Image (cartoon, rainbow, N blue to C red):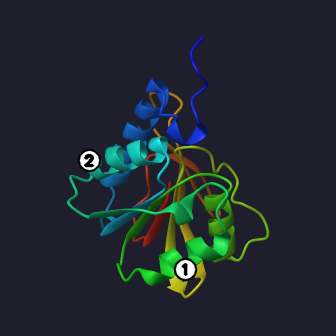
Amino acid sequence: PGARVQEEDRPLTAAGRRRVRESARAWALRDDPAPEAWIVSPYVRAVQTCEICVSAFQSEAEVEVSRRLLPTGQVSYAVDLVEERGEESLAIVGHQPLLGGLAAFLLGWSTVPANLEPGAILALDMLGPGEARLVWHAVPARDERGPLVLQRGVPRVRGLPQGPARASFQ
């Protein structure tokens, strides 16, 4: 047995890379605007996830690595990070519990959105400072059928629904 890998240095597994590629490909095929900028945690697997997603969009958009997206970071710092940006479409790549807390705060929910697991994508319309509406939520593929999409008030469907989104969390 080798030395234990530090959490921040742990890469995506082969299965994780496959799941992210499938979700990113489906996301890139939507009618949503491509993210104009990406903000990512400095953890290796988050950077790898972001690279896969940027590649799926064939994007030249700015990628900012921010320590404010560490898993144990404060939601208020992440909110400030989102609000400091001026892009119409922004993607945030990070970890639990921070991203769940950020989404719950922006949505005005008392709990973290269900099925917010590694590789999940939440698409939110920003309504104003510190306020958002859930547009769609994709759970990573576990089989050949692709990502499972959850929409508020709509039955579960495969494939990603169409429509605008501003901030996406993965």
* Numbered tag placed on residue 25 in the rendering: none
Q: Which numbered mark, 1 or 2, is in the foreground of this view?
A: 1
In terms of sequence position, does the residue under pointer 1 or pointer 2 come before the other? 2
Q: Residue 98 at what x, y percent from top left? A: 64, 60
Q: Residue 169 at what x, y percent from top left? A: 51, 60
Q: Residue at x 60, y 82 (%)?
A: 131
Q: Quadrant of the N terminus?
A: top right
Give the labeled residue for mark 2.
55
The reply to whether residue 29 is visible in this rendering is no
Q: Residue 108 at what x, y percent from top left? A: 70, 77
* Vertical order, 166 against 161 (above or below): below
Q: Amino acid under label 1? A: Asp
Picture mark count: 2
* Vertical order, 17 against 87 (above or below): above
Residue nearer the viewer, 66 or 92:
66
- Which residue in the rendered view is the most extreme toward the right? 110
Disc 1 from disc 2: Cα separation: 27 Å
* Numbered tag placed on residue 80 in the rendering: 1
Q: Amino acid under label 2? A: Ser
Residue nearer the viewer, 83 or 67:
67
Q: Secondary structure at mark 2?
A: helix
Query: Is 149 left, or right, of 59 in this rendering?
Result: right
